[in-house]
Image (cartoon, helix red, strand yellow):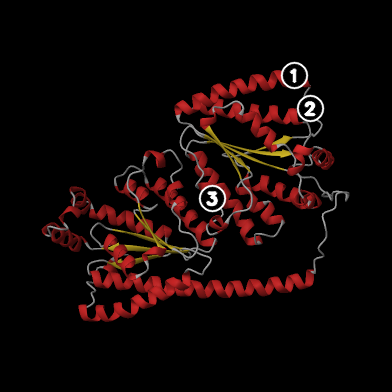
Amino acid sequence: MFETAELGRSIPKKDFEEKVESLRIELLSIQQELRKCDFPVIIVVAGVDGAGKGSTVNILNEWMDSRWIDNNAYVRQSDEESERPAYWRYWRDLPENGKIGIFLSSWYSAPFIDRVYDKIDQAEYDERLDRIKVFEKTLADDGALVLKFWMHLGKDAQKKRLKKLEKDEFQAWRVTETDWKHWRMYDTFVDAAERLIMRTSKGHAPWSIVEGADMRYRSITVAEQIRDAIKRHIEVRNTSKAAQAAFKKQHDAEAKPVKKKASKDAPVNTLPYATVLSTLDMSQSIEKEDYKKEIKALQGRLNLLARQATEKGISTVLVFEGSDAAGKGGNIRRITASLDARSYKVLPFAAPNDEERAHHYLWRFWRHMSRAGRITIFDRSWYGRVLVERVEGFAREEEWRRAYGEIVDFEDQIVDHGTVLLKFWIHIDPDEQLARFKAREATPWKQWKLTDEDWRNREKWAEYEEAVNDLVEKTSTSNAPWTLVEGNDKKFARVKVLRTVCDALEARLKQK
């Protein structure tokens, strides 16, 4: 695989200087064009020690406008990072649309080094590389341009490079005993690198192997490939957007939707077939006195379990979704009333802001993953992509359909990290919702909760019920199952939610 990167290619100084003058202008021009685009550029730089990874990144920052480049280099995980799922720090650092993010020692480093040092076997290595493929495809599917450069040196060239650096009093610090140790393990590194590149070089995120012996050659090669790739990606995206706009225009003309004010008296349009929601026993309830005893006992139990989880560094993520007026807020309050205010955070989510829209939709949720021992409660969540964005047409069909797999992978990473993840759908039937809407209208301090949007959503009851059915079918996994809560009786729902949280925490604390 690496023979073509050991040919001794180089560029004479005069030719290099001539190329650089025009190349820098082109890079700056394409970078300014990129700033207006709705996608980021993600550049991964990896390779053998001494092949010029850091120098190449410095050159790119010199030749382009560094204000629109985010440079990210990773070493050993900090305490803050190790207390979260492994990919948290990469999601946190993803560039926003219109910017370039350069990643050194990226998501490839840990599995690569672990394989070289035989800390993991071939099967686990492949499994971790497959997770990388899913991560990069998730970014590419959202429009990101992903470019990956592997800087290569032959064994003799690497030795020569390390010796040359050692002799330079200003560069000698770069060479460590670890570098020489890795040189002696050269063949092992190459075997692991070949596997890595073959398994993860895909059309949406290709690897480019660059000969690193000559600074001028590798700098020009990388810069030209970045320039050309961005230019092509802009052209492809513009063509795709033009086709989508034409299709939408034709579709809108044929549909001719009639705008109407949300009706408060229109009957709810239900589905003619059974769904996971329609089969729930909505008559379940609990007597007031029994509720008082149960809620007090469960809140005391939760307080104890939460303190034990904090001591052991076990994090908890609770997701609340449900119909309008289903009682998400009331359930959340019964949970937080049991907890130390310093140990939890409630995060309500509505429509994304400008900063959030400039990133992948999962970005705003990844960045809120808490440190060890905390409880994070999501009032609405990443499921908006397959609920409101699906039903209201804010996401294209191809976007919300692929979101199921992206969400399952996201949740797998949360659970694999050791976090307790619980997802609650609180359901009420149409008659109960109407009664609660009218009660809100009649109660001065609750009127703010009821909006025209709530009435419009009610008119789309069938569409939302179908979306929930698909959501449960595709994202209720053994790792992260959905808990469907019969919510017509608020007291019954609160007891069920609290008991589920307590049972899950207790089971997790019993694990080694």
| Mark 2 and mark 3: Cα distance apart in space | 37 Å
Q: Quadrant of residue 156?
A: bottom left
Viewer-nearest of discs 3 and 1: 3
The answer to whether marks 3 and 1 mark residues whose Cβ atoms lie closer than 8 Å is no
Q: Quadrant of residue 16?
A: bottom left
Q: Earlier in the sequence, mark 2 or mark 1?
A: 2
What residue lies at 59% left-to-right and 21% top-to-bottom? 301
Q: Which residue is mark 1?
A: 290
Q: Position of residue 157 (x, y in %)?
A: 19, 64
Foreground residue, 7 or 51?
51
Foreground residue, 197 or 163?
163
Q: Quadrant of residue 430?
A: top right
Viewer-nearest of discs 2 and 3: 3
What residue lies at 81% left-to-right and 48% top-to-bottom? 273
Residue 81 position (above or below residue 305): below
Q: Quadrant of the N terminus?
A: bottom left
Residue 417 position (above or below residue 244): above
Q: Position of residue 211 (x, y in %)?
A: 27, 68
Q: Position of residue 163 (x, y in %)?
A: 13, 59
Check residue 285 in the rendering and tell me which mark sits there, or answer none: 2
| Mark 3 and mark 1: Cα distance apart in space | 40 Å
Foreground residue, 212 or 197?
212
What residue lies at 66% left-to-right and 61% top-to-bottom? 397
Going by the numbered disc 1, the residue's amino acid type is: Asp
Crowding at dot 3, Cα within 10 Å, few <14 / some 14-19 / many 20+, comes out as many
Task: Say what secondary structure mark 2 lies in.
Answer: loop
| Mark 2 and mark 1: Cα distance apart in space | 10 Å
Total label count? 3
Going by the numbered disc 2, the residue's amino acid type is: Ser
Check residue 364 in the rendering and tell me which mark sits there, or answer none: 3
